[in-house]
Each structure stands twice: as structure tokens, then as C-alpha cells.
Image (spheres, rainbow, N blue to C red):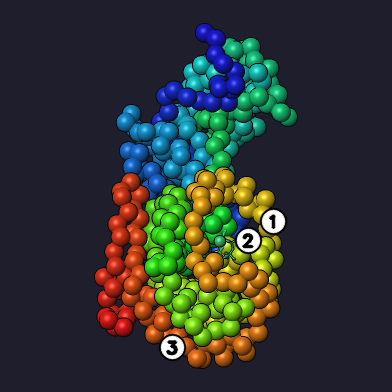
Amino acid sequence: MTLDKSSTEGSAEGRADCVILHYNEIGLKGKNRPHFIRLLARRIEMAALPHRPGRLTRLSGRFLLDVKPETDWKGLRDALGRVFGLAYFARARKFPLDLGAVAEGVLEMIAPMEISSFAVRTRREHKGIPASSKEWDPAIGARIQARRHLPVNLTAPGTTIHIEALKNQAVAYAEKIPGPGGLPIGASGRVAAMLSGGIDSPVAARRMMKRGCEVVFVHFHGAPYLSRVSAEKAGDLAEILDGYQLGSRLYLIPFGALQKDIVLTAPVADRVVLYRRFMVRITERIAALESALAIVTGESLAQVASQTLSNMAAVEEAATIPILRPLVGMDKEEIIAEAKALGSFEISIEPDQDCCSLFVPKHPATKSKPVHLRRAEAAMPADEMIDRALAESEVLEITAGKRPVTRAFLEVHPIEVKEGV
Ligand code: ATP
Ligand code: MG
């Protein structure tokens, strides 16, 4: 049988008994470790469930997920590729913990594979297991060489045959699939991410998820003065990001009326910064309702006029919880590359009407003075404006595999704002 080398080198398609999953242990010392491992187990189960897997077993330093005949491997592979906390995983075969049985099993496993050169690497779950790399690697390697006449290459093998000697069994695989790294979602608590329809904010949200944050999304749209296209884009972006956390809320805030109130009283040059200060205050209210401890934005230093250090400081002053800007030191090209990898780029570049462009001058201030901003705000019924915007908001509830459901803000948070304000 001739097989296409590019598609088969290092791949162990065919029968597979389980998936072995590894996490990075860096930073996992001490009392956080059991919590981290529990969260990761939950995240693996949530991701795997729709793909009909078998049982998940927690082992020392790794997980073993059983695979059944009805398991949808492709779907499972994609879903596991979005579980933060996983360093890598592999589709593997199980064998009795016996050198001869493993060698025979490995030979059968690699039978359909075209291999240019190989190396065997054995690891033990823990030191007490009688299957050391020193003994097993050369012994199994020699058998493969004898039967398949393949060259061994220990420095740059075409295929590495990984064997993991576990307590009661061994597993073997030839293809490691990289995980997304990071920490399991939930390990770092919750944040409220301001999600525009643009390129940057979805990338910022994903970065926070990667650091273990569960993210609640907040989008401001220009209704009733602008179209709702940006809100639809935000919904699509939130659905992409939900692929990582499986269960999300997107708050959709109509911002046009509030912007009009600002326009009626504030100096033209300060409008954009004032919009942002109100966005931050509203996001902070939502953060409190959602037990989120920080706000996240997609700002990158000096990318546009509104993102100078002094304007960041002027906006930040309106917040009482931290504003995190995971993209602050990144170039646009770097952000675009991440947006493409996330799959959000194509949606973000669709044209829309951003509410920040509503009623703004061509050249907004790059240095807004806090004292001016505070004076402008003192002339407005700020709390009422915020209550009204929240009362008219909607909450998009996203559940993986289902159509998102839109609910009124007051239905989700009945006591938060007085009806009719
Ligand atoms: P993005 O690509 O994320 O839209 P941007 O380069 O367009 O960012 P700005 O318009 O200055 O930059 O927005 C900076 C950040 O403020 C955004 O990344 C986002 O976090 C937040 N933001 C701006 N507009 C909105 C909006 N309409 N709804 C929610 N958040 C917003
Ligand atoms: Mg934008």
C-alpha cells in the first residue's frame, strides 16, 4: 500500500482507545493546583460532551479520556483545541503495562504510517512504575527496526513514538496535537470585556480567557441614530469567543440617546472621551451584577487619537475597578494576525456604524483635562442617563450548539433599575 507521506507521517489515524491530555505545570505549585486541575477537568468534559466521548480519568500530571466507537474524533479534536490549560493532547492506544505487548501494539499502530526515521520516548506517570525510558526505548526501538527496517534518529526523528507508562496500563501515540496553553477558564475569575465590532477587542477578550478569565461581553450600539449592524457583529464575535468558554452573555446597550445628552451639554472636543467614560461606568455596573472584577478593552497605545496615555488616564478616572488592556503594547499587524487565527477578522472588517463616530468632530481631543470632563458631567444627570441606557438594554444568552436567545435587561436583572426611568 502506498500512502501519501505528508498526510501520514506522524499520524496515528485508525483505531484509537483514548485521548491523553497534558497541561503545563509551571506556576501550578501549592494550594492552587487541585483547584486548577478540577477546573481543567470540568472544561475538558464540557468541551468533549457533544462529541460523545467515554469516561475522563484524572491521572498524575495528565488526563485520560476514553474514546468510544461513536465518538466524533474531528469534533472532539477541534473542541479540545479550544480548552485553555491544555499544553497538548494526543489520540492514543491503550496496552497492558508490558514491554512485549506495547512493542507489538506499537508495531500494529504504526503499520499504516509511512515513516522516514523514528525515535521511541517512554515516560512514566511516576517513578515507581517499572518501565524506565532507559530500558524500554532501546528495546522497543530494536523491535521496530527489526520488523520495519526503519532508521532510528534520536536527534531529529521523522516520527516520535511516545509511550506513557501509567499505573496499570501503557498508552502510545505518534502525533502530539498542540493545545492552546494558558489557564482553564474560571481559574482567574470574571471580567467584563467591552466588545466593539472592531478587530482589537475580540483579540483582547481571547487573551483574557487564555489567562483563565471567564468573560462577560458588553457592546454599545448607536441605536436609535445608527443601524444595529455593529450589534449583530458583536453577537457573531461573541459566538466565536464562546467556542472557548461554552456559555456567554453579551449585553447590548443602546447608546445613541445617552450620546445625544452628552452632545447637548459638553464641549465638542471632549465628546469621545466622555462617551468612553460613560461606557466604562455602564460596563462597571454590569461587572458588579456579573461578579466581574475588572474591565477589559482592546486599546493599544497610540493606535488612534482616543488611545493616547492622557486619554486612557482620563477614561480610567471614571472607573473604580481595574481596566485591563491586554493589547496595549501590540502593533496592529500582531493584533490582526491573532484576529485571523481566532477567526474573528473577517467579521470585524465588515462595514458597520460605530457609535463612537456619532456626533464627533473630525479632530477629537487627544488630551482631555479631567477637570473639564468632571465639569461637563456635573451638568448632566449621569446616573439617570446610565439607568435609562441599562433599562433599555438587551442580553444575548449564548449556549453552544443552540441559537442565542435575546432577553430584556430588566428580565435578567429585575431589581436593578426602576422601571420607567
Ligand atoms: P476595536 O478594534 O476593538 O474596535 P479600535 O481600534 O476601534 O478598537 P477604539 O474605537 O478606540 O479602538 O476602541 C477602543 C476600545 O474601546 C475597544 O477595543 C473596545 O474595547 C472599546 N469600545 C469601543 N467602542 C465600543 C463599543 N461600541 N462597544 C463596546 N466597546 C467599545
Ligand atoms: Mg473600534
Label of residue 139 in the image: none
| Residue 147: image location, x then y, percent | 58, 12
> At 59% across and 12% down in the image, what residue appears?
148
Label 3: how many Cα within 10 Å (few below 14, some 14–19, many 20+): few
Instruction: List x then y, in percent, for residue 32.
Output: 51, 64
* Residue marked by disc 3: 381
Q: How many angstroms separate mark 3 from mark 1 (CA)?
A: 38 Å
Q: Earlier in the sequence, mark 3 or mark 1?
A: 1
Side of 290 relative to 343 (left or right)? left
Badges 2 and 1: C-beta atoms under 8 Å apart? no
- Residue at image mark 1: 331
Residue 249 in view: yes
Which residue is rendered at x = 58% and y = 37% of the image?
Answer: 123
Real-space Cα separation, disc 2 to disc 3, in angstroms: 33 Å
Which of discs 2 and 3 lies nearer the camera? The answer is 3
Q: Secondary structure at mark 1?
A: loop
Q: Which residue lies most toward the right here? A: 155
Q: Nearer the viewer, residue 400 or 134?
A: 400
Tell me if mark 1 has few (under 14), some (14-19) or many (20+) residues whose alpha carbon lies within 10 angstroms of its own.
Answer: few
Query: What residue lies at 52% left-to-right and 75% top-to-bottom?
Result: 275
Residue 85 in the image: state x and y as whole percent: 52, 52
Locate residue 140: give its quadrant: top right
Amino acid, disc 2: Leu
Q: Which of the labelled discs sits on residue 327, or is there none?
A: 2
